[in-house]
Image (cartoon, helix red, strand yellow):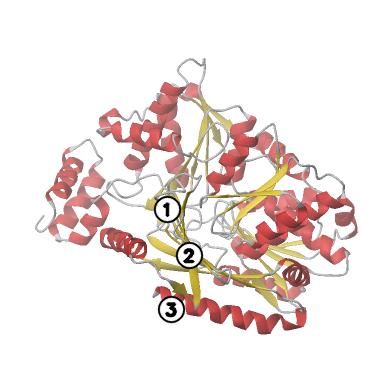
């Protein structure tokens, strides 16, 4: 193992000499013989850690890969945490679900083995189910936690492990740190008990499905509209994932009778054979759905990611062409619809609220302010929206929330983003606008005219492996030590550093505390209202730059002109940032 750091060699030798299966050891030996230093380094230079989305990585051999042992260590540590925290309770219970990815069902089985071996009752979904149903089931069954085996929208080589608390929310501080500590205490695989206790594993399925579906149907606001627009032409694709299990039956229960499925993508396949990436943010992933929509002249196109917690949509513009709506636009319009529908029904009081993340469009803040509803901004990651919901549970009502990465939630049935309810409510919204002689696209232009034209752009720089991680940290360090004074020709007036929890006014030098958990995020606010955020991804080897600009749109006829101006402003900002 020439040229490898001593700590790396030690970790590799632990795997070669430990109680790991022979196939794993053979793979390691082959790469040593081939002097494949990059493979060995990337596979063993660190242990997988919980990020904003839990445990996620490339499947394969090594401490920095997703496999039986790394997931086993995580589950043993999670078990130890639950056993300590709920030591006084007669029975500790968890729910396990998985998506369509290669090995997700196998990994879910290992997870059930370990929980049950530690004396923890396991409710185990009979087959693949969406993430939001897991969140719902935890609450419905009164469980103490749960695990979803998925890597969301990542490429096919990835898999992962989302850990949930008793509220159906992904782990947040200090609980996530406490679980990490317990995981780190698992010194060897000898401490992991893989022997399933079959008496403690209970299979669940159809009965929980029906409860989940009904909870979503109860959220429908405009049932009379759906009755009139029941033949709304909808095209839906699960992109080979779990959305195929739940979205069609929920759309049917809402009352939509003209749903066309993209049959080529209705097969559950972890290789995602019809797309490059199973990511509804990417236009390519919706290619087949849009083709089908053109054939039937559809009103709405929707596609969900593999674990059905995110949805991408396409609608017709004023020229009758299908265009993708990004996450900021869809979140804004969905929340606006919910607020207006509640307002129209006379249901708004001072107890309702919405939540979004700090990198999601501030158009939502403008909408909420206009409607007199509180809008809370939280750190990136839907778990922080769930945390806010738990904080207000029983005293205030969560109407809706969203994040720019295509994740939305309406109602309190879950504590995670839910593409199933989002599909149903987006369809209801499109039906509402059609019933009023408009369209979702035209309604978006109306909203821009009323609340301001907000335009966002996300740039992600991919930095693979150990070297990439170091480059990301160096980039953020440079932005902190030598921050830009102007961006896009506009003076930087405020810098928020969520790592130091300080907000600095660049005009007078005053500093205020940020009342959010510490996080490696920087935000730059400019004189003309632009907001630029920089953060490393918690689930992928990327550093992300979120840029938001805005302008008044006094006349919809000026949309294209203002759109060009705002895009030029975004180009200038990114040039100043050097990305």
| Quadrant in which the N terminus is drawn | bottom left
Q: Which residue is mark 3?
A: 575
What element does badge 2 sit on? Answer: loop
- Which residue lies at the image location 30% right of the left edge and 62% below the top edge? 474
Q: Earlier in the sequence, mark 2 or mark 3?
A: 2
Which one is in front, 526 or 125? 526
Q: Answer yes or no: do the residues labelled 3 and 1 have beta carbons within 8 Å?
A: no
Structural distance between the alpha carbons of marks 2 and 1 = 32 Å
Q: Does residue 112 appear left or right of residue 185 in this picture?
A: right
Spot occupied by residue 528 in the image (x, y as percentages of width and height): 57, 72
The image shows residue 1, relative to residue 562, as above or below, that is above
Tell me where residue 186 sits by quadrant.
Answer: top left
Q: Which residue is mark 2?
A: 507
**N-term-proximal mark, 3 vs 1:** 1
For residue 169, side relative to residue 112 (left or right):
right
Q: Which mark is residue 326?
A: none
Give residue 560's position: percent from left, percent from top: 68, 83
C-alpha gap between disc 3 and disc 1: 25 Å
Query: Does the rendering let one see residue 196?
Result: no
Badge 2 crowding class, 10 Å Cα cut-off, few under 14, some 14 to 19, many 20 or more, is few
Q: Nearer the viewer, mark 2 or mark 1?
A: 2
Q: Secondary structure at mark 1?
A: loop
Q: Nearer the viewer, residue 106 or 59?
A: 59
Which type of secondary structure does the marked residue at label 3 adopt? helix
Q: Indicate which disc residue 538 carries.
A: 1
Contact, mark 2 vs mark 3 (Cβ under 8 Å): no
Q: In the image, residue 60 lies at what x, y percent?
A: 32, 52
Which residue appears farthest toward the front when viewing the image?
508
Q: Closer to the N terminus: mark 2 or mark 1? A: 2
């Amino acid at each position: 193992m020439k040229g490898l750091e001593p700590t790396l060699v030690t970790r590799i030798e632990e795997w070669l000499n430990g109680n790991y299966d022979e196939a794993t050891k053979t793979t390691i030996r082959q790469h040593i013989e081939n002097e494949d230093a990059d493979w060995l380094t990337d596979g063993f230079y660190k242990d997988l850690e919980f990020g904003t989305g839990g445990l996620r990585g490339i499947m394969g051999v090594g401490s920095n890969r997703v496999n039986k042992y790394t997931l086993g260590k995580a589950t043993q540590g999670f078990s130890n945490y639950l056993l300590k925290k709920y030591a006084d309770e007669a029975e500790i219970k968890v729910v396990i679900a998985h998506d369509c990815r290669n090995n997700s069902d196998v990994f879910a089985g290992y997870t059930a083995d370990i929980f049950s071996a530690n004396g923890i009752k396991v409710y185990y979904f009979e087959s693949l189910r969406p993430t939001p149903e897991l969140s719902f089931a935890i609450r419905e069954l009164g469980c103490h936690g749960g695990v979803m085996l998925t890597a969301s929208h990542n490429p096919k080589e990835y898999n992962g492990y989302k850990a949930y608390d008793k509220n159906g929310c992904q782990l947040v501080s200090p609980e996530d740190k406490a679980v990490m500590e317990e995981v780190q205490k698992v010194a060897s695989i000898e401490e992991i008990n893989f022997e399933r206790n079959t008496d403690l594993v209970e299979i669940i399925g159809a009965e929980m499905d029906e409860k989940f579906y009904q909870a979503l149907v109860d959220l429908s606001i405009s049932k009379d509209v759906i009755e009139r627009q029941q033949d709304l032409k909808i095209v839906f694709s699960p992109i080979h994932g779990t959305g195929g299990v739940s979205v069609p039956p929920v759309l049917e229960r809402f009352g939509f009778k003209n749903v066309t499925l993209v049959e080529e993508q209705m097969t559950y396949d972890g290789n995602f054979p019809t797309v490059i990436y199973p990511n509804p943010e990417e236009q390519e992933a919706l290619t087949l759905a849009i083709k089908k929509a053109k054939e039937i002249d559809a009103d709405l196109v929707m596609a969900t990611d593999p674990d059905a917690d995110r949805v991408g949509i396409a609608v017709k513009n004023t020229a009758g062409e299908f265009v993708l709506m990004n996450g900021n636009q869809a979140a804004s319009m969905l929340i606006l619809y919910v607020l207006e529908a509640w307002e129209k029904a006379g249901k708004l009081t001072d107890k309702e609220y919405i939540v979004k993340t700090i990198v999601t469009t501030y158009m939502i803040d403008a909408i909420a302010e206009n409607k007199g509803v509180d809008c809370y901004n939280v750190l990136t990651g839907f778990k922080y929206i769930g945390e806010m919901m738990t904080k207000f549970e029983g005293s205030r009502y969560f109407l809706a929330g969203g994040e720019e990465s295509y994740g939305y939630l309406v109602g309190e049935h879950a504590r995670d983003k839910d593409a199933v309810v989002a599909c149903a409510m987006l369809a209801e919204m499109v039906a509402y606008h059609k019933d009023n002689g408009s369209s979702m696209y035209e309604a978006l232009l109306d909203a821009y005219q009323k609340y301001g034209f907000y335009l966002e752009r996300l740039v992600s720089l991919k930095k693979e492996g150990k070297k990439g991680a170091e480059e990301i940290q160096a980039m953020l360090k440079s932005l902190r030590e030598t921050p830009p004074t102007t961006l896009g020709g506009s003076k930087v007036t405020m810098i928020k550093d969520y790592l130091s929890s300080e907000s600095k006014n660049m005009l007078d030098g005053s500093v205020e505390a940020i009342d959010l958990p510490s996080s490696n995020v920087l935000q730059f606010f400019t004189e003309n209202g632009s907001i630029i955020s920089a953060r490393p991804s918690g689930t992928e080897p990327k550093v992300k730059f979120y840029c938001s600009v805005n302008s008044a749109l006094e006349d919809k006829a000026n949309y294209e002109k203002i759109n060009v101006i705002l895009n030029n402003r975004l180009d200038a900002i990114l040039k100043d940032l050097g990305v």
